[in-house]
Amino acid sequence: MSGQALILPVIMCGGAGTRLWPVSTEARPKPFHGFGARRTLFQATALRVAGEGFLPPVVVCGVSHRGLVETELAEIGVAADAIVLEPLGRGTAPLAAVAARLARERHPGARVLLAPADHAIADETAFRRTVFDAVAYTDERIVTFGVEADRVETGYGYIKTGERLGPLTSTIDRFVEKPDAATAEQLLKSGNHVWNAGIFLFSPEVLLAEMAGLAKDVDGAAGRAFEKASFDDGAIVLDAAEFAACPDAAIDRAVMEKTDRGAVAACRVGWTDVGAWNEIWRLAHRDPLGVATHGPVTTEDCGNALVWSDGPPVAVLGLSDIVVVAAGGGVLVAPKSKAQAVRTLVEALKASRARRP
Amino acid sequence: MSGQALILPVIMCGGAGTRLWPVSTEARPKPFHGFGARRTLFQATALRVAGEGFLPPVVVCGVSHRGLVETELAEIGVAADAIVLEPLGRGTAPLAAVAARLARERHPGARVLLAPADHAIADETAFRRTVFDAVAYTDERIVTFGVEADRVETGYGYIKTGERLGPLTSTIDRFVEKPDAATAEQLLKSGNHVWNAGIFLFSPEVLLAEMAGLAKDVDGAAGRAFEKASFDDGAIVLDAAEFAACPDAAIDRAVMEKTDRGAVAACRVGWTDVGAWNEIWRLAHRDPLGVATHGPVTTEDCGNALVWSDGPPVAVLGLSDIVVVAAGGGVLVAPKSKAQAVRTLVEALKASRARRP
């Protein structure tokens, strides 16, 4: 790594993970759970971007999750470069603008690796190698990471690769958001579509130049929220009024889909966004009948099922292709095939509880 | 009722209700739950046999459930004639022998109505009328109550009625225990089979004479357990050693299947033994899709389902003909059709928890 720019990881802890209710809750959302692994998704993310070539990470989280972040970093012995508190969620574009300013100010010459804290990557070494390889393109381009698709997947975004820039890196032809099954199958067969991992590597100057041109409102408001930030016991608190005035925007839509300075680095690193319970089942150890369990669980005459408990005894009898989760004081039961639809159900449940006297 | 013998209700609280886990537990078994009704099954049983013609009830329960019995009786303003504590469960036959001795001693001339506390009867008036009508046969016979079957039911015992003794009362031809579906259908069509409600009306003298002849061991041991009983703060505690030495026996098998002094009084009173969750569903109020819910529950795209919570929010998505119960700190998920098989599953769960360090 000698002679190459250092990388400043900026870890975004904003994923609510509503589809992973009842484990994922507002008080302790998805990034702060391990779903069976020893480390939480946040901890795994922080460890993945640590070591030679990386600066200590910047962690961006909601005000109410600061305690979780600090506790979890202490558990893994990682000291953050900074903790940035979002007064409210405004998407990834304003965070990219803030991260770029922070890096420019504190670590001139460093590249920003903007990464969500709620994904899993099995092969960390391959991931880091891909990141270091991609640094070469960051003088000119904003690099996004594309994962080689290995199955039909309707829950992910896809990137169509364009002109080859290097062995694994291409320009971006276009983005395809969550296709239907038939389209997803075509994309898989095409050989030139990768899953959008939502991870970005950029030099602050390139990112800010592009945002000034393509997402001026977002950049302006995020910049002011950063300029007017206050400090609270060492954490950077973005200015609430300025940040609230910032349009809600994803960097994919606000910048990447518009810029001609984008690039995509393809990799096969065992990436998953751990989006819903069917993915937890897919990642879990399963018995010969396809049953994955966690906690004090008894199953009989079940197949291809996930039965999960964080404490309550759970008994499931005679059901297949099902997800049963008892955690955080709540219970979810759904067919595995409908795990993606849990979001609306949970929102209905919250609404009905709010209505109760 | 003037001129007729008084009736001493003896309420047996022994039903464990394992199939109704996780609501029914060892600490608070089935009789002490209402399953959606305002009164518990025990309270409903006590109120059903109160009023003109009835003496205050004798309640038989396990030592650990005395507090529940006293609290629940106080709630409904019923004072027991006596509380009898079983050192352990030995079935209904020894309890019949104890009840007969208690009645003979404390209420000469009274008839004993021996009834389990874990059944439901919708039409209390019709039930009491049937009981009073049956008293006429108790000088000579032990009367059991038979419920007119109105559907194919494999979970119940049946009684084949014999020779007509009165408008609704017959001799007993034979008992048929839990038939398979084909047999149950034949029994339903036969017109001369009724469900065995497990309720008995007898004069102490007749019962004890029959037991002395047909179940001498049970009668002897139960008699000694009663003679040597101690008193604990007003409750009668059956002698543990003598009661432990008593064979485990049901009055149906030990006496009724053998005696020629049996009779069965047929009634249609909306009786159910509330045996398993599919019966709770059948008894519950259901929406037009056949979904019955209890507690903070959200369902979407479900049909013919029971979703029950005693507190935890429960969300069920896209499943039909299913039972989901979150209660007492445990969770059960099973197809409605397999509700009867919950017993073995719960026993497996208990065993697996006992094994854990």
Image (cartoon, coloured by chain):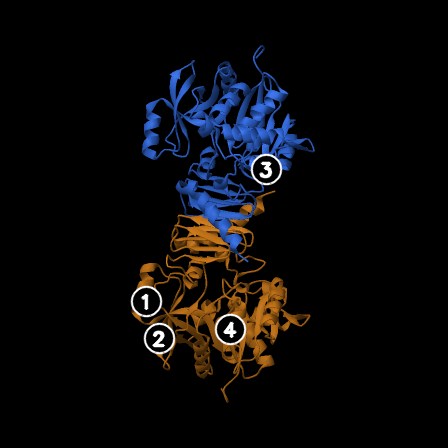
Chain colours: A blue, B orange
Please give the chain letter of the residue carrying mark 2: B
Q: Is residue A260 above or below residue B130?
A: above
Q: Are marks 1 and 3 in contact (CB under 8 Å)?
A: no
Measured as percent of width and height from the top left, residue B240 is found at: 63, 64
Measured as percent of width and height from the top left, residue B207 is found at: 50, 76
Left or right: A159 in relation to B15: left
Q: Can you see residue B217?
A: no
Measured as percent of width and height from the top left, residue A86 is found at: 59, 35
Please give the chain letter of the residue carrying mark 4: B
Residue A80 quadrant: top right
Q: Residue at x 51, y 85 (%)?
A: B5
Please name which of the two marks, 4 or 2, marks the residue nearer to the observer: 4
Q: Which residue is mark 3?
A: A241
Q: Amino acid at mark 3?
A: Ala
Q: Which residue is mark 1?
A: B188
Q: Are marks 4 and 3 in contact (CB under 8 Å)?
A: no
Q: Which residue is mark 2?
A: B162
Same chain for the residues under marks 1 and 4 in the image: yes
SS of the residue at dot 1? Answer: helix
Left or right: A83 in relation to B213: right
Q: Which residue is mark 4?
A: B114
Please name which of the two marks, 1 or 3, marks the residue nearer to the observer: 3
Q: Are marks 3 and 2 in contact (CB under 8 Å)?
A: no
